[in-house]
Amino acid sequence: MLESLHLKNVGPSPKMELGLAPRLNLITGDNGLGKSFLLDVAWWTLTRTWARHLVIPAPPPARSEISYSYTKSTPGSFSYTSTFDREEERWSVRNSRPAIPGLVLYAQVDGGFSVWDPARNYWRTASPERPSAYLFAPHEVWEGNEHCEGLIRDVASWQRENGEPHAMLTQVLRVLSPSEREQLIPGELRKLTVDDPKRYPTLRMPYGQDVAIPHASAGMRRIIALTYLLIWAWQEHMAAAKVRGDSPAREIIFLIDEIEAHLHPQWQRRIVPAVLKVMDVLTGHHGSRVQLITATHSPLVLASVEPLFDVDEDAWFDLDLEEGRVILQKREFIRRGDVSNWLTSEAFDLKKARSVEGEAAIEKALELLRQEDASWQDVQAADQQLREAGLPDIDPFWVRWNYFFEQRKPPAPKGKPAKKGKR
């Protein structure tokens, strides 16, 4: 498992430190502050390869370092501090056989996927012939490359053979389904066009139709792709370990960027607990431990882990912009109940869980509530702004505001009854 990550003069901040938990690690923060960057660096520390682009440090004369530690297949932890060689344009690695962190999987938000398998990618000589890692571009996940047949062909073959991979596919899809009522179930194989010889896998929709996977929704395609590569990676790892006479990996590290991408809110509430359960389905009796490190923009994802969050097993890290500097800190995980409370937490920093116009109108109204000498003209203007902001009649702020409004309303002239307006 990845235990720690310390960055100096690399990335959006002069200094970043992560002391990771052994099971679940959540990373939140605004766009552009470094969530995907941290996942990229985490992948590199574990595999010595870059899944996307080489990370370039701060310009000279700053000294840049990436320090990290992780548990390995043998007792103890592996620790190293890497520095950047500007002439070679590469980060240093220890000149010895690398430690094995386990099976490492990285799902990128664009649909790309990376796998580092100790049974297939681990090098033993100075000139390794095996690939240093398996890096799949989004289209390769579906169409295949020199390493795999791709989702369309493999899933169709699994279904025809009706063996263990197809059974796993069915089980994993069930675990990752959006709800008990809307189960993801493989449908019948289907030919799509006259000229295309392939038979395409389908998903059986809740309304009874079988929809070819390429025509499914973006959320369903992301989940089926994730399911396929998890099964493909584990099956290939098991087969390679058997050929080599090794035991399967006892540790699996799973990196996911924007775990909620394309998913309906109902699905967002289930995805993290489901992913943690999926590995039990895959590894079965092997007893492998799983560490999940994921970036998220979703308050529903944070709310969804409240029932299972354990301070000894899990952690939450947050990126913020403070006085022009990016700050990474470990936050105390507080159960907040209603998801709107997460929107106004340190994770998302919204003042109000409302529209921008509603937030501005309420802030103006609150300013008047704090004034003892607010003019009637200002109160009327704030009341109009609240109504134009479209606050619903059931918004709890109306109770407080209407009382204040009536208290500040000037008395009607004597002899003339006050007009009653609908409020």
Image (cartoon, helix red, strand yellow):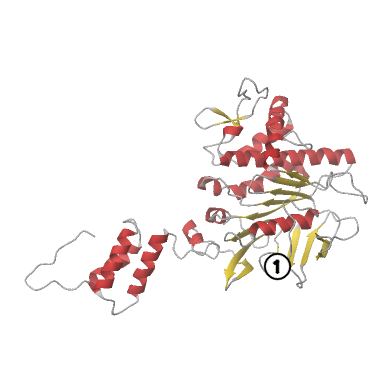
Please say if 273 is above or below 95.
Answer: above
Q: Position of residue 306 (x, y in %)?
A: 57, 57
Residue 333 can be seen in this image: yes
Task: Find numbered disc 1 in the image and state the secondary structure of the residue it sits on.
Answer: strand
Q: Position of residue 302 (x, y in %)?
A: 56, 56
**Residue that extends furthest to the bottom in the rendered view of this protein:** 373
Quarter-of-image position of residue 380: bottom left
Quarter-of-image position of residue 183: top right
The residue that disc 1 covers is 17
Q: Residues within 10 Å of mark 1 (few under 14, many from 20)?
A: some
As shown in the figure, which amino acid type bears the numbered disc 1? Glu
Q: Say whether residue 291 is left or right of residue 333.
A: right
Please say if 296 is above or below 371.
Answer: above
> Which residue appears at 62% of the width and 68% of the height?
326
Along the viewing direction, whichever of 57 and 133 lies nearer the viewer: 57
> Which residue appears at 57% of the width and 47% of the height?
270
Along the viewing direction, whichever of 409 and 184 lies nearer the viewer: 409
Along the viewing direction, whichever of 111 and 161 lies nearer the viewer: 111
> Which residue appears at 78% of the width and 65% of the height?
67
